Image (cartoon, rainbow, N blue to C red):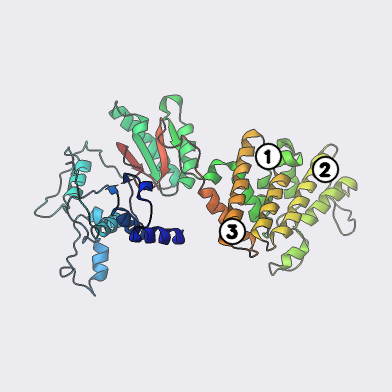
C-alpha cells in the first residue's frame, strides 16, 4: 500500500500521466478524519481536478485552539494557556471533539475555497440550546451566557444511570416506548441505538426487545456484530482452534457438541448429549488429555481427572461392570452405561480421539499454505453443515485463501504458529461485509459507534 501511495504521489508531482484518465471531479463525503498522507495526495490531485470535501463541522467559529479543562491543567506547568491562546470554548466540544478539531485544523494548512452551510438550531429546549452553544463556541454558565433554566417537561436530553448492561437495555426499551407514546409521528426507523461494544450488547438487545409482549414490541435490527457473531459456525470454529494446545477443559469440549453441525458429524443427538454431560461429570473428567500433558503445564503427571482416565472408566464400565467396588488394571469401571447408550459412548470416543489428534497438529509451526490445507481438513472433520451453514464455512475457506494469497504477494514464506494464523483469520473475517439489510432497516437501528452513523436519525441513544 505504501509503495502504491508513493507511486501515485510521484505521478501527481511530475504530471507524467494521462489526464484523460482522471474524473471530472472528486467528492469526499462524510469523512470524520483523514491522515496527512491522504490529504497530501488529495491536494496533489486538486492541481488537476476539482476536489470537493463535504465535512460536518459542529462549530462556525475557529476552534483549533480549544482544549479540554483537564488537558489545560496538565499543560499549565509548562505552557501558559493565555500565551498559547488555549481556551476551553465549549466544554463538551473540547472534551469530545478532539479528532474533528485536529482534522479541521489540519485542513486549514491547504489551499482551498470554503463554503459554509451552518444552520441555526431552532428551539429552546436543552438539546437545541446545547447545539447552539457548540455552534457559536459558547461556555454556558458565565456572565455572557447565563445558565439555562430547566423545564420539568424538557426531555430532549436524558441520562440514565443503570446497574448493569441488561438493565441499560431494559430502560432503553421503556424510554423508547414512552417516546413513541409522546410523539405519535415518530417511527422506530427514526431511532438509532449506538454501543461501543455491540458484540456484547447485541444479544442483550435481542433478548429484551424479542421477549416483549406483542403490544409492547418495537421492531429493531442489530448491525456491526461482525461475521463471528452473525455466523455461529465461524464462532464454533474459533472455539475449536482455541482448544488446540490448551487444557481441553471439559466444559469447553462439551460446548463444541452444542453446535448441531458438530453433533451431526459424529452422529450424536440432543438426547445423547444429555447422557454425555452426565457421564463426563460423574466419571470425574475435568481437563487434560492424559497424564503426560499435565507436565507441559508444570504439574505432576497424574492421570486423575483427565479425558483418557475418564474414558477408560466409561468404556471398561460397559464391558466389565465392577459394581462400584472392583478394580480392573487399577481402573474403577463406571457402570452407568447400558444397552443402546453404548452407541453414544462410541461416538463420544470418536469425537474425543479426533480432538486429541488435532491438539498435536495445532501445536506445530507450518507455512501459511500448509495451515490453509490443515484448517480446511479441520472443517471437514468436525462439521457436517446444512445448506445455510455451508455458506458460513465457505467464509472461513475464502478467508484462508485470502491469507495465503496475501502471503504470496508479500513474499512471506516462513513457518508460523497457530496464534498468528488465528489473528490473521480474525482480521480477514472482520473485513468481510456483514449481512445486508441490518443497517437502516424498517425498525430501530442498533449498531456500533461508527463515525457519521447518527446523522440521519432524529433520536440518538447511547448505551454502554
Select label 3 or label 1 by which is in front.
3
Q: Residue at x 68, y 60 (%)?
A: 245
Dot 3 alpha-carbon crowd within 10 angstroms: few under 14, some 14 to 19, many 20 or more: some
At horizontal 83% and vertical 41% (from top left) the residue drawn is 342
| Residue 461, numbered circle | none
Q: Residues within 10 Å of mark 2 (few under 14, many from 20)?
A: many
Q: Is residue 64 above or below residue 174?
A: below
| Mark sitting on residue 337 | 2
Q: Which residue is mark 1?
A: 261
Do the CB atoms of the residues marked 3 and 2 lie less than 8 Å apart? Answer: no
Q: Nearer the viewer, mark 1 or mark 2?
A: 1
Which residue is nearer to you in this view: 16 or 83?
16
Q: Which residue is pictured at 21% across the width and 38% down the height?
A: 152
Q: Position of residue 388 (x, y in %)?
A: 62, 35
| Residue at the extreme bottom | 78
The answer to whether one can see residue 29 in this image is no
Label disc, if present, on residue 407 of the rendered structure: 3
Amino acid at each position: 500500500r505504501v509503495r502504491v501511495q508513493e507511486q501515485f504521489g510521484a505521478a501527481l508531482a511530475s504530471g507524467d500521466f494521462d489526464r484523460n484518465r482522471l474524473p471530472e471531479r472528486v467528492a469526499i463525503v462524510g469523512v470524520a478524519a483523514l491522515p496527512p498522507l491522504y490529504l497530501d495526495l488529495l491536494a496533489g490531485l486538486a492541481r488537476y481536478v476539482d476536489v470537493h470535501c463535504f465535512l460536518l463541522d459542529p462549530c462556525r467559529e475557529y476552534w483549533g485552539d480549544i482544549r479540554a479543562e483537564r488537558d489545560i491543567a496538565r499543560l499549565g506547568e509548562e505552557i501558559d494557556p493565555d500565551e498559547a491562546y488555549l481556551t476551553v470554548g465549549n466544554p463538551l466540544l473540547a472534551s469530545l471533539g478532539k479528532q474533528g478539531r485536529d482534522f479541521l485544523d489540519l485542513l486549514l494548512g491547504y489551499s482551498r475555497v470554503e463554503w459554509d452551510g451552518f444552520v441555526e438550531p431552532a428551539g429552546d429546549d436543552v438539546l437545541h440550546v446545547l447545539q447552539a452553544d457548540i455552534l457559536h463556541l459558547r461556555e454556558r454558565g458565565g456572565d455572557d451566557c447565563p445558565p439555562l433554566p430547566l423545564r420539568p417537561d424538557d426531555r430532549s436530553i436524558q441520562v440514565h444511570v443503570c446497574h448493569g448492561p441488561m438493565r441499560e437495555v431494559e430502560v432503553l426499551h421503556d424510554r423508547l416506548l414512552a417516546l413513541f407514546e409522546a410523539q405519535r409521528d415518530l417511527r422506530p426507523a427514526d431511532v438509532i441505538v449506538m454501543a461501543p461494544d455491540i458484540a456484547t450488547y447485541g444479544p442483550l438487545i435481542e433478548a429484551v426487545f424479542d421477549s416483549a409482549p406483542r403490544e409492547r414490541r418495537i421492531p429493531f435490527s442489530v448491525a456491526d456484530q461482525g461475521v463471528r457473531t452473525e455466523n455461529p459456525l465461524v464462532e464454533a470454529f474459533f472455539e475449536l482452534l482455541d482448544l488446540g494446545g490448551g487444557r481441553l477443559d471439559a466444559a469447553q469440549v462439551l460446548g463444541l457438541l452444542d453446535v448441531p453441525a458438530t453433533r451431526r458429524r459424529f452422529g450424536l443427538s440432543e438426547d445423547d448429549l444429555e447422557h454425555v454431560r452426565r457421564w463426563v461429570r460423574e466419571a470425574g473428567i475435568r481437563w487434560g488429555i492424559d497424564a503426560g500433558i499435565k507436565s507441559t503445564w508444570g504439574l505432576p503427571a497424574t492421570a486423575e481427572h483427565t479425558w483418557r482416565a475418564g474414558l477408560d472408566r466409561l468404556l471398561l464400565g460397559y464391558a466389565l461392570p465392577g459394581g462400584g467396588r472392583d478394580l480392573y488394571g487399577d481402573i474403577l469401571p463406571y457402570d452407568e452405561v447400558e444397552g443402546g447408550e453404548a452407541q453414544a459412548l462410541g461416538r463420544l470416543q470418536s469425537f474425543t480421539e479426533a480432538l486429541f489428534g488435532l491438539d498435536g497438529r495445532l501445536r506445530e509451526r507450518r507455512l501459511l499454505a500448509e495451515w490453509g490445507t490443515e484448517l480446511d481438513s479441520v472443517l471437514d472433520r468436525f462439521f457436517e453443515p446444512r445448506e445455510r451453514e455451508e455458506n458460513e464455512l465457505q467464509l472461513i475457506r475464502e478467508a484462508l485463501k485470502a491469507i495465503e494469497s496475501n502471503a504470496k504477494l508479500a513474499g512471506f514464506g516462513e513457518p508460523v504458529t497457530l496464534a498468528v494464523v488465528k489473528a490473521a483469520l480474525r482480521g480477514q473475517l472482520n473485513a468481510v461485509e456483514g449481512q445486508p439489510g441490518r443497517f437502516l432497516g424498517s425498525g430501530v437501528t442498533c449498531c456500533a459507534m461508527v463515525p457519521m452513523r447518527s446523522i440521519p436519525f432524529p433520536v440518538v441513544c447511547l448505551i454502554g
